[in-house]
Image (cartoon, grey):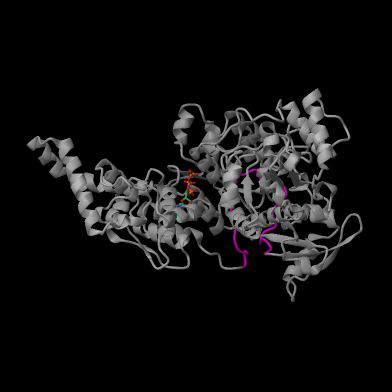
């Protein structure tokens, strides 16, 4: 293990902390020697940010619900891997007044799980999703400090710079993706009195588990070299993982893979396994294809020490050139080994709509050709899903699928994220430099989502990479050859962006080998099949359906959020089903959706009656209120006072029923809270 990754637990004697704090308050300075060097550095940074130890944080940004939802969407690949791990960890620390928290690289809390009682207490210092916990706003704290120096850390009690956070004990570990980029932090926070020295180990193991899963999701279909100091450590979460090209180039790694070989992230895409282990790739490949399958073999590291390694996966059929021919970028793909029959991910998307069928067939024809795909359509229509399916159904499926959301990257970081950077290339650059996402896509598919949002200056650089097929990292260094298939997507009409001079015409033609327009959900003719597919995804273990009248109304809704919105609604409906229910009806719809569908039904069926009412010129408002009150009374009587049943009979949500009851003065003891069962489920859902 390198020193940089040794566990960091900053337990400082309380007397020293008191002395340091007094000194800080009295003189505004922090003398040397009182605190551990790392804690000292963090307190100094907090002081330099102008924070007062006894004060409250001022002007801290906090994401709105919409911003948080967007951040969750942008980080969905991370969340998909992190959620199950967080649930597992939350189970381990249950009943210990703790929260398991995931934060993004900007310190924003994305997701939190744990004790409700402690969550309330933590919320008082804004330790909840949407809050930002960078050191610059909240001083020394585990999330902010782990992000600031990129290492696992415990910040316990009064080690927090702000006194108001002194009731917390927090352990945090950074999460790094297979290209060495920082993705966020996994943190376990609890009441200071419950401090346990093993919590840091738990946070660190959880971060490793997530990194392991991220590696498998990105590189699992290709050549993977597993490393461990003991053969029985292979195939466990403590193994190091390296993704290799067929010529031995190291394309990606988990943190442990880099540690075992003593490599920095900047070695990815540059260093070969031969240079790192003195072993020819042909020998490793011979292991995979040998009569007995791949067995662990002893390998020698550059320092002479021994390690066990085993190569798994399929050998790409064609050796990839280190420098690709200067043709247009090819169309590529990940998934199972090339030797296995390819599962046709594209066919799975063909659920009966004629326009979608046609575009899938067109995409299929160019999969193996050097033609870049441009996917267009409203947000949520399935552009990324289609891109992944193209990758999985094409000849490059054994390589990585690297998706980049050009709209989500902060503008000042896009360049470094895409092209990589040399150590110290700019303020805030990673100590070891970074290879950049374009090089991570080598051998696979590069998916540039929301390419219409890429700044013009970067468009010029990207165009150069696509033409020359080599990347030059920020801060200089040798250009590196890259070979990937290109798929771009945008919800904007790119042709119009070109006309408005917001998008370069030459880049437009380069990325638009074949343009495919995905239809919005409201125009698709396969609504029922899509619903069934989404229900199967939401509840794989049982077969859930939708009541026909509800399905018919859902099909007529406009769905501004397209398939993403439909998938969310169906997931919520499934969560609201009782254990013995398998059919979604009115009572399972989220309130806002039920109300919108009611309005739709009324608009479609009640219109002639309304016209009639207008003609009769009745005192409309009074009549409606009386009619509403009568209906509510009747429904409650028929349901024998059961409000859920009454709401069902009226075809409105429980909230609407409560409102109508209140308007009609029907129940002064009205308790508008959701009943316990729904409440519990909603919590489960939000968690
Ligand atoms: N054909 C489909 N079947 C099932 N689910 C789908 C389908 N198409 C899209 N989805 C689901 O809808 C959601 C949105 O899909 P996706 O992210 O691919 O859309 P998008 O067009 O790329 O959106 P954006 O433009 O906002 O990035 C995802 O959860 C995806 O799994």
Stretch in magenta:
314-339
The one of 478 and 312 positioned closer to us in this rendering: 312
Image side of residue 149 versus residue 503, left or right: right
Image side of residue 377 versus residue 444, left or right: left
The one of 4 and 134 positioned closer to us in this rendering: 134
Image side of residue 138 versus residue 306, left or right: left
The one of 438 and 620 positioned closer to us in this rendering: 620
Q: Is residue 349 visible?
A: yes
**Residue 92 counted in the magenta span:** no
**Residue 321 counted in the magenta span:** yes
Q: Residue at x 78, y 47 (%)?
A: 267
Q: Position of residue 286 (x, y in %)?
A: 77, 68
Number of numbered markers: 0
Q: Position of residue 396 (x, y in %)?
A: 61, 56
Q: Residue at x 33, y 59 (%)?
A: 585
Residue pushed farthest top? 27
Residue pushed farthest bottom? 291
Residue pushed farthest left? 616
Q: Position of residue 465 (x, y in %)?
A: 65, 38
The one of 307 and 359 positioned closer to us in this rendering: 307
The quarter of the picture where residue 161 lies is: top right
């Amino acid at each position: 293990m390198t020193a940089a990754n040794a566990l960091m637990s900053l337990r400082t004697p309380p007397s020293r902390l008191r002395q340091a704090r007094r000194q800080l308050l009295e003189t505004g300075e922090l003398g040397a020697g009182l605190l551990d060097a790392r804690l000292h550095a963090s307190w100094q940074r907090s002081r330099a940010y102008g924070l007062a130890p006894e004060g409250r944080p001022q002007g801290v940004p906090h994401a709105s619900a919409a911003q948080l939802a967007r951040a969750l969407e942008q980080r969905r690949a991370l969340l998909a891997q992190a959620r199950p791990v967080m649930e597992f960890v939350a189970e381990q620390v249950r009943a210990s007044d703790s929260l398991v928290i995931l934060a993004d690289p900007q310190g924003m809390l994305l997701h939190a799980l744990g004790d409700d009682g402690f969550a309330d207490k933590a919320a008082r210092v804004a330790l909840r999703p949407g809050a930002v916990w960078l050191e610059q706003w909240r001083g020394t704290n585990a999330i902010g400090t782990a992000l600031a120096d990129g290492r696992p850390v415990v910040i316990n009690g009064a080690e927090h710079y702000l006194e108001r956070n002194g009731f917390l004990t927090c352990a945090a570990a950074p999460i790094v993706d297979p290209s060495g980029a920082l993705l966020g932090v996994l943190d376990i926070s609890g009441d200071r009195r419950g401090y346990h020295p093993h919590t840091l180990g738990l946070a660190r193991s959880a971060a490793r588990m997530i990194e392991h899963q991220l590696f498998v999701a990105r590189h699992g279909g290709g050549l993977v070299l597993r490393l461990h100091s003991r053969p029985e450590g292979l195939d466990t979460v403590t193994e190091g993982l390296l993704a290799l090209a067929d010529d031995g180039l190291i394309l990606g790694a988990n943190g442990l893979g880099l540690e075992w070989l003593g490599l920095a992230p900047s070695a990815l895409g540059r260093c070969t396994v031969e240079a790192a282990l003195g072993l020819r790739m042909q020998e490793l490949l011979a292991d995979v294809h040998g009569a007995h399958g791949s067995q662990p073999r002893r390998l020698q590291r550059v320092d002479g020490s021994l390690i066990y390694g085993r190569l798994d996966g399929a050998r790409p059929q064609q050796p990839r050139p280190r420098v690709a021919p200067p043709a247009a970028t090819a169309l590529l793909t990940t998934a199972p080994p090339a030797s296995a029959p390819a599962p046709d991910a594209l066919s799975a998307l063909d659920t009966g709509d004629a326009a979608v069928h046609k575009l899938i067939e067109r995409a299929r024809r160019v999969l193996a050709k050097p033609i870049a795909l441009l996917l267009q359509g409203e947000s949520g229509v399935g552009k990324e899903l289609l891109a992944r399916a193209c990758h999985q159904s094409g000849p490059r499926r054994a390589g990585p699928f690297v998706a980049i959301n050009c709209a989500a990257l902060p503008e000042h970081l896009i360049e470094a994220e895409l092209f990589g950077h040399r150590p110290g290339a700019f303020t805030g650059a990673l100590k070891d430099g970074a290879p950049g996402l374009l090089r991570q896509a080598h051998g696979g598919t590069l998916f540039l989502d929301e390419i219409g949002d890429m700044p013009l200056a970067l468009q010029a650089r990207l165009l150069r990479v696509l033409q020359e097929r080599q990347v030059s990292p920020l801060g200089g260094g040798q250009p590196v050859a890259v070979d990937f298939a290109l798929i771009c997507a945008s919800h904007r009409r790119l042709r119009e962006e070109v006309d408005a001079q917001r998008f370069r015409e030459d880049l437009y033609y380069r990325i638009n080998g074949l343009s495919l327009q995905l239809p919005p959900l409201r125009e698709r003719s396969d609504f029922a099949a899509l619903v069934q597919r989404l229900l199967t995804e939401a509840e794989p273990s049982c077969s859930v359906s939708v009541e026909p009248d509800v399905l018919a109304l859902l099909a007529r809704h406009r769905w501004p959020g397209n398939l993403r919105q439909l998938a969310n609604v169906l997931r919520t409906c499934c969560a609201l089903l009782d254990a013995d229910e398998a059919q979604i009806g009115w009572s399972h719809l989220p309130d806002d959706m039920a109300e919108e569908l009611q309005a739709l039904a009324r608009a479609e069926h009640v219109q002639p009656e309304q016209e009639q009412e207008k003609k009769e010129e009745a005192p409309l408002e009074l009549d409606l209120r009386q009619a509403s009150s009568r209906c509510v009374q009747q429904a409650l009587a028929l349901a024998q006072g059961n409000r859920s049943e009454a709401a069902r009979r009226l075809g409105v949500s429980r909230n609407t029923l409560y409102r109508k009851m209140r308007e009609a003065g029907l129940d002064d003891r009205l308790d508008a809270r959701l009943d316990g069962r729904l409440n519990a489920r909603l919590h489960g859902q939000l968690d």
